[in-house]
Each structure stands twice: as C-alpha cells, then as structure tokens.
Image: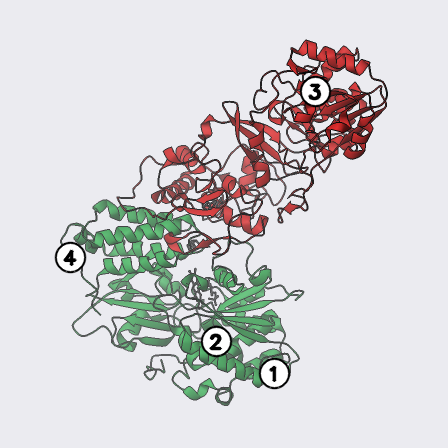
Amino acid sequence: MGFPHKPHPKETVVLSQYFGDADARSYAGWVQRGGYEALKKSLAMTPVAVQDIVKASGLRGRGGAGFPTGLKWSFMPKERTRTHYLCCNADESEPGTFKDREIMRWTPHALIEGCAIAQHAIQAEICYIYIRGEFTEPLRIMEKAIAEAYQNGVLGANAMGSGKRIDQFIHRGAGAYICGEETALMNSIEGKRGNPRIRPPFPAAAGVFGLPTTINNVETLAAVPHIINRGADWYKSLYLSNPKSTGTKLISVSGHVQRPGNYEITMGFPLKDLIYDLCGGVKPGRTLKACIPGGSSVPILNKEESESCILDYEGTVAKGTMLGSGGAIVFDDTTDMVYQVMRLAKFYAHESCAQCTQCREGTAWTVRILQRILAGEGTIQDLDLLLDLADQMTGKTICVLSDSCAAPVVTGIKKFRGEFEAYIKGARKPVMATV
Amino acid sequence: MPVSVPKGTTILEAAKQAGVLIPHYCYHPGLPIAGVCRMCLVEVEKQPKLQISCATTVAEGQVVNVFSDQAKKARQGVLEFLLINHPLDCPICDQAGECELQDYVFQEGQARTRYADYAKRFNPVEDFGPDILYVPNRCILCTRCVRFMEHAAHDDVLNVSERGDRAVIGIHPDKKLDHTWAGNVVDLCPVGSLLSKDFLHRARAWELDKTASVCPGCSQGCNVNLDTRNNVVVRLRPRANLEVNRYFMCDYGRGQYRWMNHGDRIEAPLLGGKDLTAVDWDHALDRAVQLVKGISGPAVTLVSPGASNEALYLARQVLGNARLQAAFRVHREAGEWSLAGVPDLALRAERAPNVAGALALGYREEFEAAIQTAADAGLLLVLDDALDGVAPEALQTPNIIYLGTRLPEIARRARVVLPIANVAEEDGTFVNRDRRVQRYFQAKAAPGMARPAWWVLGEILRGLGRGDTLSSAEEAFDLLAQSEPAFGGLSYAGLGVRGAVLGSRQPAGQPA
Ligand SMILES: Cc1cc2nc3c(=O)[nH]c(=O)nc-3n(C[C@H](O)[C@H](O)[C@H](O)COP(=O)(O)O)c2cc1C
Ligand code: SF4
Ligand code: SF4
Ligand code: FES
C-alpha cells in the first residue's frame, strides 16, 4: 500500500513501492531510484523486441478487460506510414477503483516512462494521457512531471538522445464515466461527444483522428518499465494460481473493511486474505455479506464466493465474476443490498451515453423499478421483469456499460432475493446503508 | 434463402435484395452508419452475440437468421424500450400511417407494455426553424437528423444533448434549422418527432396518393413524389434516385406544390376579337390551324423551360415550315445552394426544370431578340411564357397563338388562347442539367377543359395534315425520339422512373 499505511507483509510491492514517498515525484528523485533506465534500454531495442518482452511477460490490461498487452501492441501496423498514437487511459471513473490515481499522484514518472516505452514499441510519436476531470491533484503532478521530462530531454524531438521524437500531452476529461471506454475516449480527445464507436474499425486500424491507435490503462503502462528492467521471466513468475495471470495487481479496497486502500498483490492472491488480513476484515461484531471484486461493473459475490475467490482473471471468472479494474467493494451484514443495487444502477443510468436503446431506456427503467421496490410498492413480478430487462441489456449494445448495469442487478436478485422480497412483502422498511 | 451480393455489402442491404426488410431505425442508406438503435439485430451463425445487420458486412457462405427467437426477442425488447417514453399520441401525430415505430410494433411488437404507471419523459415542443418543429417526446434518438445536418448539410446545428434517458436532440443556441436542405430531416425522422409546420395537421398519411414526378423548381431535376388529397397537391417529397438527388430535395422545391393548385387558371379555349370568347376545342383548334396555315413572313415561338420535351418538340413541328426563331428565357438566381456532403446536388441558379431539354430541342436562350423579331413576324406561338415585362407595343403585328396555364393581360391580344395542363396534371419528360431525361406522371386532373400541351399541339399538327391524334405522352415522346438525334435510342417506357441520360442509348441500370 505505501500510503497512508506501510505495505502489509503479504503484499508484493512493485508499482506501489514509492507510494507515500514524495521525493519520487520529481525527475531527480525518480532517476535516483533507477527511473528511465528501462526507457534507455528500450530505445536501444527494436520496437518488435520490446513488444516481444511484454508479450513474454504475460502482462494483461489492467483497465478492465484483461487483454494481453503485448498482443494488443502487435496489432499496430508494422510499418509506420502514418502517425501512430498511444492513448493512456487515466479516466479511472469506475466506482470502487482508485489505483491509477495513486500511481499518478506518487510515481508520475513511472507512467511517463511506461508510456514512452509503449510509444517506442508501437512507433507512436504522440501519446495522449486522458486524465479524469475530477483528478485535480494527479493532474497537477502529471503536468509538472511531463514538463520536467521535457526539460531533461526524456521527451521531445530527441528523446533521451535516441534521435526519436516522443511527445506526451495531457487531455483532461470533463466528468463523464463513459469517456473511459476506449473509443469514447478517442472521440473525446477529438473534441467530439464521448460516444463509444461501433467496431470495426478497431483502434489499431482507425483510432484517434482515424489513425492507428493503442489504448492502455495507467496501471498497465506503469508496469512496463519494471518488466523491461527485471525481465519477462521475472514478471511471468509472479503468480500464485494460474500462469495466464501474471504480475502484480493493485486492488482498491473500499467499503466495510477496517483498512480500506490500495493493496498490491501477486496475481492469484485469495480475496479472503485480502479482506481479512490485509484490510483487517470487517468491523468487530459484523460479518462479511458480499463483495464486488473488480469495480462496480462486475457481478456481486456472496460471502462464501468471496471467501473462496482467487484474485486473478481466471479465478474471478470461475466464481462468475471478473477481475475488472480491481476495485473491491466490501459489504458487511448491515448492508441493504436492494439499495446498493439501485445505487449502482442509478450510476449507470446517469452515465449512459444514450446511444443504444437498451442502455438508454433500460438503465433508467431498471432504476425506477428498484426505487419502487425500495419504496415498498414493488410486486413480485418486478423481479422477473428486472431479470428480463437485464437480459435485454446484455450483449446487445455498442459498449458494455449496459451489461455493467445488468450484472449487479442479476446477481443481486439471484443471491439476495430474500431482501428484495422482504421489501415487496412489506416486511422491510426503507433504510439507508450504514457506513 | 441464398443471396449473392458484392463484397462489403451489409447484411441489412443483402437481406433487402433477398426481399427481407430487417427492421431498423438509425440506418438510412443516405447517411453514415451509426449502429445505435440496435433494432436490426440478427443472429449470425457461429457468432456468440447477435449482430447489428446495418453495420455487419456479409461473408461468403454466412448463414443469417433474421427471425430466430433470440433475434426476434431482442427486437421486441428494443421496441418495448422505445415505447416506454413514447407518448402514443398517434391520433394527433402527422407521422401516423407512415411511422416506422407504428409499423414495426405492428409487425413484431408486443401487445402490452410492462412499464408500470411511471411518468413518461416530457419535454416541450421546440421551434427548430422556419418550417420545422421538434416534438422531443416522440423522439427515439436515432440521430438521423443529426447525421444529416452534420454529414450531408455540413451545418452542425443539431446535436444529441444530455445523457441517459434525459437525452434529447439539441439545437445550436445561436442558430436555426434553416438550411436550404433542412426539410429533409422531417422525411428522415422515422417517427413524428420532426414535423413540417407547413404540413402540420394538413392531412393524414393514409389519405394521400403518391405520384412519381420531377421537381419543377430548378434544373437539378430532383425526383419527387407529389402527395395529393382530393385533387390537391399537399406536399412534395423526395423520391430516391441515386443518380440525381439520392434521397433528398431542397426546401425551395418543397414549396413548389403551392402554385400547382392555384385557381387562376384558363379553363376553356378562347377566341380573340374585341373580347375573348370561350369556345369548344374544335373551334379553337380550327382557328389555330388556320393561323398556322396563313403564316406570312417569319414565325417566332417563345416557350417556357418548364414545358415538357414533348410539347417543346411538337411546338417546333407545328411551325416547322416557317422561318422560325425558337427561344426561351429562364429565371436565374445569383448562386447555388448545394447539399455539401452529396456530390452534384444543389438548388441550381436556373429555376426551371427543362432548360437542357429546350436547348437539346433547338431552342435558344434569346428571348429579347425573339421579341424584336416578333414585332415584324407573321405568327407568334407562345408556350406558357407569361410574357411579363414585354411591352404591349412590341406585339402589335403578329398573330398570337397562346398556350398557357394562366392568362396574363398581354396575352389577351392573342387570336386564340388554348388552356394547358401544368406539371401535376399531365405526363411528360424533362431533361435535367446533367442531360438525364426523366418522366413525370399525372397526379391530379387539369381544371376545366385544359389539356396537356402535347395533345393540343398534336391536334394542331393533325389539322395541318401532318399527324394523327396523340393519345399519350408516350406517343409524343417516341415521335420525338425518332426524329431528334439527341434523343436517339431512348424510349418512353425505357426511361422508367429513374430516367436515362441523353446519348446513353439505354436507361441507367438502377433497380427500380
Ligand atoms: C463504460 C466503460 C468505462 C471504462 N472506463 C475505463 C477507465 O476509466 N479506465 C480504464 O483504464 N479503462 C476503462 N475502460 C476499459 C477501456 O475501454 C479499455 O479496455 C482499457 O482502457 C484498455 O486498456 P488495457 O488493455 O491496458 O486494460 C472502460 C470500459 C468501459 C466499457
Ligand atoms: S451501451 Fe450505453 S454507454 Fe455503451 S454505447 Fe450503448 S448507450 Fe452508450
Ligand atoms: S428527431 Fe427524429 S430523426 Fe432526429 S433523432 Fe429523433 S427520431 Fe431520430
Ligand atoms: S439500424 Fe442497425 S443499429 Fe440502428
């Protein structure tokens, strides 16, 4: 964790090594800590060689989908006949996720270095770092770090004396969750409304400004310098369960735990240990009720599932959920799950970009039904209706925001049906969640 | 059912060719693909998810199931979602009867909604422009209107404002929807959300008869339908022709219907003398024939470039034996108003539909010179030129035969006045500026005794012993095509509803 607490002995500290260490924010401080060595090394290699190392490391996207990073990079055209772009997705708006913010706050140069290496690997002169609009402090720190990187010749026309141009620009978001979706993000950079685009074309063929583009999450890119420095084999060896999920992962834990915060674990770490050991468990006298392990968009786990869930891409899928962006929201027995599900759905209804019919109308309708149930006016048929709407909202739209709204509704009803029925039967009166 | 189409064709278009209309809202062949309404979902073999047929291209040997349970359920779902906020005010909605929401709900939808008694979204009606109202409550956010203004008109006045189910179509705060081609958004809107103020509550869609025609507004020759009710043209709407106007027409053209219904028409043949007296056709034609027979000296014919090729050709035939000056004039505006995103489409400066036809048939744009000649001519044959601006003294000498729709004061000097049909009242052809010969069809009855000019002129020719009665524009056109080299190889039937280019010897190969 590093900040505000010391790392727990069970953490594997890689990305978070300098969290809380303000000196690491400056260029000088970063270089003292071995910064920009990986970039220097990479620039001496061919782009394909860098891609191959990242491929071999097993690194997968930390933004939600877990797509193999090296493979994604290899989709870019081999010959650079047109401008290539890298977009760094720092929009981090998924409720429950706050790891990218910490990376930018404490180790801005790690991100700049990771972006620069990726730029070299995909032959992109230009990188846009798309920072969530509400992130004012990370924005300031990133701006300062980029200015320093230019001053010290890391970025610019002759990046680190390599003769290559590497530019990085910050693009500030304006408060829309959907702009974290990669194609909406590209539209937003272009100055358009942040609507996801239909695919094909895929970004590697026609991305930002219609040119070949790769989009990666902050944490994904920040991991790259470590892989270059310490080797693909080292990174590949970092797993506790399934060799297809390698490396470390920052998990943002929020909700009913004694010590919420960002924890860096090796892939394959048990969710149970994360909750009970690293985070100190739920408050005394309470018991765990549920956990959303990967940010608000993934299905909810009940107590038993949570306590047996392995935190990696395969382990979460085995429990019917996903690792997502790694935002673990923990609920104890005081939680009103009906209210929680409504609150999540309300978020998606608010943030739907309104393009797809199912999402625009379905998210809002879902909220209305849930609110009616909470007000004690629901019917038992409402539950089937909610499930049917969720089915209509899944797998039919341009992006997965619609699916993300459906997931907590479906799992909420399946796993906590009794609570919904209690409202419907009038056995339960509306209560607010206790914090 | 197997269908074979060029590479890159979408499933939706391929299905159309196989005779299957996959329900869709946001897709329109004249606009960039948006893929947002998700109505056109179909099942594609070996694909785990349903695919949108408007954006998915076909593949060799691909099996598509449009009517699988899964696909039908998904489309029913979209319809139900679209209806939860739709007001169901069809009885007072102009779109009713030609509404794609009504149509597809009728075709595939469910009888009942499961949307309990929640309030529907409400936003007040907005005045978008000189002729356009926006009724947000009916909007299904297909974005056709936004895409038209952005990609076809290149005038970004519309947008999608807000997110979630609060989203509505927004308009630029300092602009109006007043582009020359803006009216197309009303046609493009699949529901009754964008309405023409001019047409507001004027007719129910099912009361209208549609007749294929060509817009008489300018030399572009946009293909249109004349919508008529009870012998009155109530609106003009574009008819698709990829070679001419794609799916669009301009607002000036839309306004053309007004004069088609004017009541100030000549309703009977008239003979000159001290006063004009109404007579029957036999008398009037007789007089006209005598006048032509008795020509001494040069003859002049002044025609309107809004007359049909058939009439223009026959008018020259009538005066064929005389020394003839054949002329026309055309009203020209300073400039063109193009639809920027569509090549070769503009409201043209030349505000008449058949300038190219007149030129091809030997008429010259030398009206003033012809008036001077007429001063000493033996005979002046006028074909629907209003003679406005011509000094009465200039027309002292000649005998005048006046074929017209209306009777201007100066035409009262004519020896014989013959009432003719206007473009809505006859069949005929025009040649547009790109030399495309296009047919228009009769949409309503001509007033009184007025007859198509080609019939009138045909009768005069018969009286002169140079032809038989013409019973259709087709006969007139085929005569023309036989004797005018420019029209060689064309036949009236072969023109179809999309026309053919002069000299091309064959109609354009477009599916009807
Ligand atoms: C609605 C929505 C919101 C998203 N928001 C974010 C985000 O805030 N940050 C992020 O990195 N990825 C986000 N993603 C995932 C991105 O689309 C994309 O998969 C990711 O940035 C790719 O980077 P990676 O391969 O490094 O994970 C979002 C996806 C969706 C559908
Ligand atoms: S699923 Fe929702 S958020 Fe995603 S593109 Fe469609 S409407 Fe927009
Ligand atoms: S106004 Fe009509 S065309 Fe425009 S988005 Fe709404 S439904 Fe579609
Ligand atoms: S018609 Fe295909 S998504 Fe709208």
Left or right of A234? Residue B73 is: left
Residue B454 numbered mark, or none: 3
Mark sitting earlier along the chain (4/2): 2
Tell me the CA gap for discs 3 and 1.
84 Å
User: How many marks can you see?
Assistant: 4
Task: Give the label, 1 or 4, closer to the camera.
Answer: 4
Residue hosting label 2: A222
Q: Do labels 3 and 4 share a chain?
A: no
| Viewer-side residue, A27 vs B201 | B201
Q: Report the amino acid beneath label 4.
A: Lys
Dot 3: chain letter: B
Looking at the rendered structure, whether the residues under marks 3 and 1 are on a common chain is answered as no
Q: Which chain carries label 1?
A: A
Instruction: Decide: is B144 above or below A123.
Output: above
Asked if residue B417 shows in the view, the reply is: yes
Residue A160's disc is 1
Q: Nearer the viewer, residue A62 or A310?
A: A62
* Tag 2 subunit: A
Q: Which chain is red?
A: B
- The amino acid sitting under disc 1 is Met
> At numbered mark 1, what does the secondary structure look like: helix, strand or loop?
helix
Of residues B221 and A296, the one nearer the viewer is B221
The tint of chain A in the picture is green
Kind of residue at badge 2: Ala
3D distance between C-alphas at marks 4 and 2: 47 Å
Image quadrant where one finds the N terminus of chain B: top right
Marks 3 and 4 sit apart, C-alpha to C-alpha, by: 84 Å
- Could you tell me which residue is drawn at 27 percent across and 46 percent down? B118
Which disc number belongs to residue B215?
none
Q: Residue at x 34, y 44 (%)?
A: B84
The residues bearing labels 3 and 2 have C-alpha atoms spaced at a distance of 82 Å
